[in-house]
Structures are given as structure tokens and as C-alpha cells.
Amino acid sequence: MAAPSPVETATDLPLLGWREWLALPALGIVAVRAKVDTGARSSSLHVESQETFHRDGVEWVRFGLDTGRYQAPLAFAESPVLERREVTDSGGHRTERIFIQTRLCLAGRQWEGEVNLAQRRNMLFPMLLGRTALAGRFLVDPAASFLQGEPPPEPTP
């Protein structure tokens, strides 16, 4: 039997709008507003602050971010640093960014993905979900928004 064509298998992929809510459970983030950005190679998390430190001989990063939820406090997380790489932003500016690897959850799917941390103020979307994270997992309708629904309620302390 012949392997299915890409068109046949693509129909089984979840459909995303140009903006969605996704979870980063290993970072304790139940929902962050994300722009689904097929023009960006890598995924990016826009942090308000970040600092690196060492734990057991391994470089880690501690950061705070605005999840994009209405009146939600800053979320704080820590992660081992995967690596540092140069990234070219949409304006053509090259900067070195810290990359982490973390679990991403969206549309009932979970996977490990690389995310770079960027300190950029006043971003409408704290997360950009780039094409490396999207490839083979989702289809995107650029005319639709929040096809995967609203975020879960904020956990109570």
C-alpha cells in the first residue's frame, strides 16, 4: 500500500487561527497568548526580565513574563539554558538570545520545543509560535482567531 500523500495526512492536523492560547506546563504557565507566526523560524517568549545563574554546574535562566491574560500578575519561571544563538528579528536586527527547551501544549497536542527569550516591551503577544514548532503538527487559517477556544481559568492561589 502506498504512503498517504501530504494532502491526505494534512486533513488530520488541527486547525489554528493566527492567534491562540497555549500552555507551557513545565514553566507553570497554564495559558499564554500566542501569535501563530509562520514567518518566524523559531518560537519566542517575550520576557519582562531575565537573569542567568548556575545550579549544579549548569547555566539556568530565571525570567518573568506577562502571559497576556487580563489583569494577571507577572508569571515567573526558571529553566536550564539550552544554548545561546543569534536571531534576526522582523526588523533585520541581529541579537544573541537564550534558548530553552520546554513542553508546549496546544489543541490537545504536546511536544518538546525550543523557545528563545526576548526582552521586548509592549508586545501584544507574549509568545510567537514559529514555523519550526508548527511544521507537521498544525494547519493555520490566517483569517481566523482563537479556533482552539478560550484559556482555562486562572488557578486560584
Image (cartoon, rainbow, N blue to C red):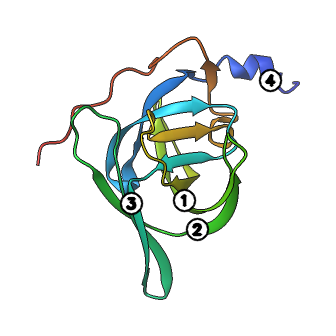
Name the residue nearer the viewer: 8 or 133: 133
Amino acid bearing label 3: Ser
| Residue that lies at the very extreme toward the right in this rendered image | 2
Badge 4 or badge 3: first in the primary sequence: 4
Residue 7 % position (x, y):
78, 17
Q: Is residue 46 above or below residue 141?
A: below
* In front of the other: 40 or 101: 40
Give the residue at mark 4.
6
Left or right of residue 150, residue 119 in this image: right
Using the numbered discs, state the Cα–Cα distance from disc 3 to disc 2 in whole angstroms: 18 Å
Please tell me whether mark 4 or mark 1 is closer to you in this view: 1
**CA separation in Å, label 4 and label 3:** 42 Å
Tag 4 secondary structure? helix
Mark 1 vs mark 3, foreground winner is 3
Q: Find numbered disc 2 in the image and state the secondary structure of the residue it sits on.
A: loop
Going from N to C along the chain, the mark reached first, 2 or 1, is 2
The answer to whether residue 126 is left or right of residue 88 is left
**What separation in Å lies between label 4 and label 1 (alpha carbons)?**
28 Å
Image quarter where the N terminus lies is: top right
Comparing 92 with 21, the one in front is 92
Residue type indicated by callout 2: Leu
Label 2 to label 1: alpha-carbon separation: 6 Å
The x and y percentages for residue 93 are 69, 50
Say the numbered circle drawn on residue 82.
2
13 lies above or below 53: above
Query: Which is closer to the viewer, label 3 or label 2?
Result: 3
Check residue 101 in the rendering and tell me which mark sits there, or answer none. Answer: 1
Query: Residue flagged by tag 1: what amino acid is it?
Result: Gln
Q: Residue furthest top?
A: 143
